[in-house]
Amino acid sequence: MIRLEQRLTAFKTRNLRNIGQDYGALIALVVLILFNLIFTRQFNSVIAITDLLVHVTPTLILGVGMTLVIATGGIDISVGSIMGLTGILTYLIFSGKLFGIQNIVLGTAVAIPIALAVAALIGAFNGLLVTRFKVQPIVATLIALIIVRGVAEVTVNGFQFAFLSAPIVSWLSGNVLGFLPKQVILMSVIVAIFAWLMHATSFSRYLLAAGGNQSAARLAGVPVNRILIIVYTLSGLLAGVAGLAFIAFDSAANPVSDGLGRELDAIAAVAVGGTPLTGGRATIMGTVVGAIFIQLIRQTVVALNVPDNIASVIIGVLIVLAVFLQRQRQA
């Protein structure tokens, strides 16, 4: 009888631990939402909710790309710098300073694909460093972080440029049907595409195999190097998209501050969302929950007149907790 009770207790403990590991971020998000509904004024308004989703858009778009990279056992800390360069490059092209295009609408139509192509090429460069030259991912992307941010600052001497009347502002900001922000639509489409990609394609199986054990994956015929290059390229491309969404919302491009520290928020969103930092597993929807949770923490401390540094401390603790839970899962 005693053994049966011990087994039941162990079974319940194990189930509670599994629930915490699988749904801990979602449970924490629900608790935080309930807290805001009770203690934060006007939190239940449509404006407050859309404001939350608009502000989380760049971080979540970065987080989707970061999820893919971390699932391969790597990391990409260059995405914030890519965001900054994307904004400056877009401005230089649509303003006519780079290619001499005088029509601002035509300039913007040309600037967007070029800026995204450059962002993707930077990601591909990261992938080549990791695969062909066997550079550690954090070192490879650190090189890109420094170079890309430096290029963005030197190109415009560190100046910020405002463009309130630029077409990109009207194209990527504002509302559809009077209440649905365009940036949220963009974010939702990206999340849907990559959630489908990770659930219904062979690419996801190859990616997770490469992240789980590269040597075994190669023996099984998985094109590991090609997968890694594609993943880093996608991370760079999504960083470019996040950069465009950010400058459209901010109506300005700043080579110094745009994207600064965003890579850390993206990594935190991935970790809190349940994707292990050791690779081999990925959850796009978990990253969605993690990104919203982190942004809501920042907005909550602001609403309660708590210094923003406190939010950074909380996020740091959450990352430690997420890593601890992941280690428990592996054990």
Image: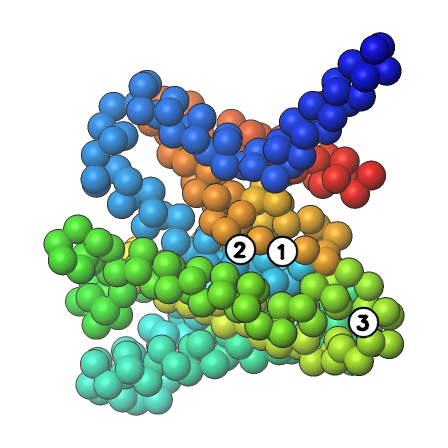
Does the CB distance between marks 1 and 2 fall below 8 Å? yes
Q: Is residue 216 above or below residue 18?
A: below
Q: Residue at x 32, y 85 (%)?
A: 110
Give the residue at mark 2.
284
Q: Position of residue 2 (x, y in %)?
A: 84, 10
Residue ID for mark 3: 217
In the image as oriented, which residue stretches furthest toward the top? 2
Residue in the foreground of this view, choosing between 330 and 168:
330
Amino acid type, residue under disc 3 in the picture: Ala
At horizontal 21% and vertical 40% (from top left) the residue drawn is 47
Mark 3 burial class by Cα count in 10 Å: few <14, some 14-19, many 20+: some
Residue 204 can be seen in this image? yes
Image location (x, y in percent) of residue 170: 20, 66
Say what amino acid the circle numbered 1 marks. Answer: Ala
Please identify the residue farthest to the bottom as the structure is shown: 100
Residue annotated with mark 1: 282
Question: Which residue lies at the image location 80% right of the left edge and 80% below the top edge?
Answer: 221
Residue 247 visible in the displayed image:
no
Image vertical order of residue 212 relative to residue 316, above or below:
below
* The C terminus - image quarter: top right
Measure the C-alpha gap from mark 3 to mark 2.
22 Å
Please count the marks in the image.
Answer: 3
Kind of residue at badge 2: Ile
Q: Quadrant of residue 244?
A: bottom left
Give the secondary structure at mark 2: helix
The residue tagged with tag 3: helix, strand or loop?
helix
Nearest the eye: 96 or 20: 20
Question: Residue 261 versus residue 285: which sits nearer the camera?
Answer: 285
